[in-house]
Image (tube, helix red, strand yellow):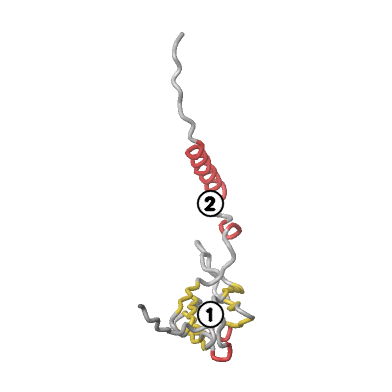
Amino acid sequence: MAEKELTPWRPFTELSNLRREMDRLWEGFFGERPFARVWEREWAPSLDMSETKDNFVVKAEVPGIDAKDIDISLTGDILTIRGMKKQEKDEKEEDYHLVERSYGSFSRSVRLPTEVESNKIKASYKNGILNITLPKSERVKAKEVKIKVE
């Protein structure tokens, strides 16, 4: 009786191969990434939030958007940025080979870690970057306390 050699089963390798084959099939039938927009998440600007001793600073990438099309609001401890990126309309006919830019309305919300002075919030917009400065409430600012060590 001949001995049979065991082959280890690698399910993740098999799944990866199956995925690659399915992608190849779809690309061959419909062209590259025909349904990409359906599967990608809704467009929203990228945010950075940092903290200094006195402020929170939120920066949002919103290139191609007019400042008048951006709305900033604070409800409790939730900062919300809303806006609309309008699609450019050209009168000349164009045949697009690739469209990756996103258009339409967006809304991004971020919870602030502590209370802020809502009447002192400032916002500026330059070179596609929205910069929002939110002064911390005097009640929650860290106060330096000297402790005598014995």
- Give the number of the mark in front: 1 or 2: 1
Residue 150 horizontal/vertical position (percent): 35, 78
Q: How crowded is the residue under tag 1: few (<14 C-alpha within 10 Å), some, or many (20+)?
A: some
Q: Residue drawn 54% across and 74% down? A: 92
Q: Residue drawn 61% across and 83% down? A: 73
- Name the outermost residue toward the left: 150
User: As displayed, is residue 19 above or below residue 55?
Assistant: above
Q: Residue drawn 47% across and 82% down? A: 142
- Name the outermost residue toward the top: 1
Mark 1 and mark 2 lie on one chain; the one further toward the N terminus is 2
Q: CA distance from mark 1 to mark 2?
A: 31 Å
Q: How crowded is the residue under tag 2: few (<14 C-alpha within 10 Å), some, or many (20+)?
A: few
* Amino acid beneath label 2: Gly
User: As displayed, is residue 3 above or below residue 46?
Assistant: above
Residue 117 horizontal/vertical position (percent): 56, 88
Residue 49 horizontal/vertical position (percent): 48, 75
- Name the outermost residue toward the right: 75
Residue 91, by quadrant, is bottom right
Pointer 2 residue: 31
- Using the image, tell me which numbered label, if any, was put on residue 138: none
* Amino acid beneath label 1: Ile
Pointer 1 residue: 65
Q: Secondary structure at mark 2?
A: loop
